[in-house]
Image: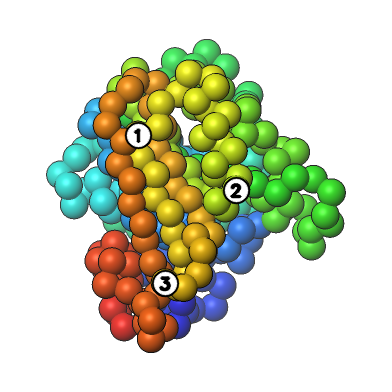
Amino acid sequence: MPGTHALRKNGFTFRQFFVAHDQCGMKVSTDGIILGAAAPLPTQGPVLDIGSGSGLIALMLAQRLQTAGQAVTVEGVELDAAAVRQSRQNVAESPWAAAIQIHQGDILQWDPAFSRRYGLIVSNPPYFSPGVACRNDARATARYTDSLTHEALLETARQRLLPTGQFCTILPVEAGESLVTLAEQQGWFLRGLTLISELPQRKAHRLISVLSRQPGAVTHQQLMIRDDVQQYSAAYRQLTEAFYLRKSG
């Protein structure tokens, strides 16, 4: 995003941390930045990022938790070994090295005793069905649901959430709506829905959903990334101002 952060070779510099991503299947993206900035902070318990990649979302949540005065740990689980090595380095060089742990493993097999419960689980999950060739195996693992189906994702989130916990994802609109429908069929309750558009005249292209195992009020929001003159919108700037080096877009 030109004009909002400093591009360095193989990564991005934010206000308080740097994210190297040249060893990761998925690079720093607008999706990840929005999820890290918009996910609801937990009322209790630690945070889990499923498919943590470069560590971007874990770092953003750690910054927000510190700002909010919450002494909460953040954990990430990532399948790809190269991404794990790089994200651990990103964490080690950040102000929150003591508050973030990155684990290597398949979330469907990791910690089979399910002894730890989380107040918030976030994921920027796979959403493409297998069939279309991808340019490399790491990117395919990050983006294709043959490695982690949404059914399996919902089940592992259910097993790992505290009773009052929330599960938050960002997906393309159609995939996000399908995930919400599937979740409700499995006994989840929708607690928040944000439709994200690139421009005012364009249809929403991303959806953030917040799910819980307990019923409650549902929050509906819309977010435009850019305004009519192609500048970052006031709402987007407000959402991300704690992370970007400059506010201009």
Color encoding of the figure:
rainbow
Q: Which residue is mark 2?
A: 174
Q: Which residue is mark 3?
A: 200
Question: Which SS class for mark 1?
Answer: strand
Residue placed most toward the observer, 237 or 43: 237
Q: Nearer the viewer, mark 3 or mark 1?
A: 3
Q: CA distance from mark 2 to mark 3?
A: 19 Å
Q: Taking 223 as reference, is 138 left or right? A: right
Which residue is pictured at 30% across the width and 79% down the height?
246
N-terminal label among 3 and 1: 1
Q: Quadrant of the C terminus?
A: bottom left
Q: Say which quarter of the image contains residue 139.
A: bottom right
Q: Say which amino acid is labelled 3.
A: Pro
Q: Which residue is mark 1?
A: 191
Q: Residues within 10 Å of mark 3 (few under 14, many from 20)?
A: some
Q: CA distance from mark 3 to mark 1?
A: 25 Å
Residue 88 lies, in percent from the top left, at: 49, 50
Q: Say which amino acid is labelled 2.
A: Glu
